[in-house]
Image: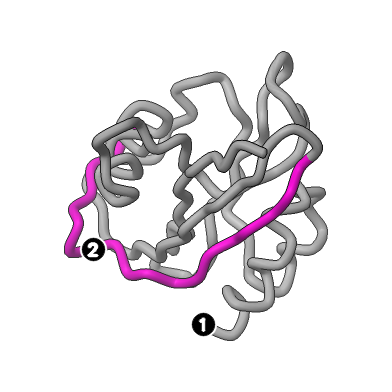
C-alpha cells in the first residue's frame, strides 16, 4: 500500500477559533470539513508544503517559525495510507479567503465534532481541544 504524505494546519484566530475548509464538489470526500493543507511534493518539507498550500488555497503567508508541531494522523484508507503531520499556527499575514471555491468556517474547539470530517481528521479533535 502506498503511503501518501500530506500536511495540515490548525489556523487559530485571536478568539481561539480554528479554521475548517469544506472539500469542494468533484474532490474525493467532497462536502466533508478538514483542516487546511495538502500533499507534500517530492523534495518539499511538510512546513514548506503548508506555507505553499496556505498561499494557494487561502491567500495568506506564514513562516516556518510560526508553525508549531501539534500532532499527526496515520490512517489506512482503501487505496493508500495517509500520514499527516499537523501544525498549529496563530500568526500569518493577509486575510483568509477561499481561493478554490471552498466554504470556510471559524469553529470553536468544542464545536468541531458538529462538522463531518474525513476519518483521518476526527482523531485530531481531542488533541486540538486539549491544546486550546
Circle on res. 66: 2
Circle on res. 131: 1
Q: Return the x and y of residue 109 as percentages of the image width and height.
A: 64, 71
Circle on res. 77: none
Q: Please say whether residue 132 is visible from this viewpoint.
A: yes
Q: Please say whether residue 94 is visible from this viewpoint.
A: no
**Position of 97 relative to 14 (above/below):** above
The magenta segment: 59-77
Tally of marks? 2
Query: For residue 41, what is the image quadrant?
Result: top left
Question: In screen coordinates, is 43 left or right of 95?
Answer: left
Q: Return the x and y of residue 72 as percentages of the image width and height.
A: 53, 64
Question: In screen coordinates, is 21 left or right of 117?
Answer: left
In this view of the protein, which residue sits in the foreground, 111 or 33?
Answer: 33
C-alpha span from label 2 to label 1 = 16 Å
**Position of 25 relative to 36 (above/below):** above
Look at 63% across and 58% down and name the residue there: 74
Kind of element beneath mark 1: helix
In this view of the protein, which residue sits in the foreground, 75 or 97?
Answer: 75
Q: Return the x and y of residue 75 as percentages of the image width and height.
A: 69, 54
Q: Cβ–Cβ below 8 Å for labels 2 and 1?
A: no
Q: Return the x and y of residue 20 as percentages of the image width and height.
A: 59, 48
In this view of the protein, which residue sits in the foreground, 42 or 102?
Answer: 42
Look at 54% across and 39% down and name the residue there: 4
Q: How would you rate the neighbour count of disc 1 (Cα within 10 Å): few for under 14, some for 14-19, many for 20 or more? A: few
Question: In screen coordinates, is 17 left or right of 52?
Answer: right
Give the residue furthest to the bottom. 130
Amino acid at each position: 500500500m502506498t503511503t501518501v504524505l500530506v500536511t495540515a494546519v490548525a489556523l487559530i484566530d485571536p478568539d481561539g477559533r480554528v479554521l475548517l475548509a469544506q472539500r469542494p464538489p468533484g474532490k474525493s470526500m467532497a462536502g466533508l470539513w478538514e483542516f487546511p493543507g495538502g500533499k507534500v511534493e517530492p523534495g518539499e518539507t511538510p512546513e514548506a508544503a503548508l506555507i505553499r498550500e496556505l498561499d494557494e488555497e487561502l491567500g495568506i503567508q506564514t513562516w516556518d517559525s510560526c508553525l508549531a508541531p501539534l500532532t499527526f494522523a496515520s490512517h489506512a484508507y482503501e487505496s493508500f495510507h495517509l500520514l499527516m503531520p499537523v501544525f498549529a499556527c496563530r500568526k500569518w499575514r493577509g486575510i483568509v479567503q477561499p481561493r478554490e471555491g471552498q466554504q470556510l468556517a471559524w469553529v470553536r474547539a468544542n464545536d468541531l465534532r458538529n462538522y463531518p470530517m474525513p476519518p483521518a481528521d476526527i482523531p485530531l479533535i481531542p488533541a486540538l481541544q486539549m491544546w486550546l
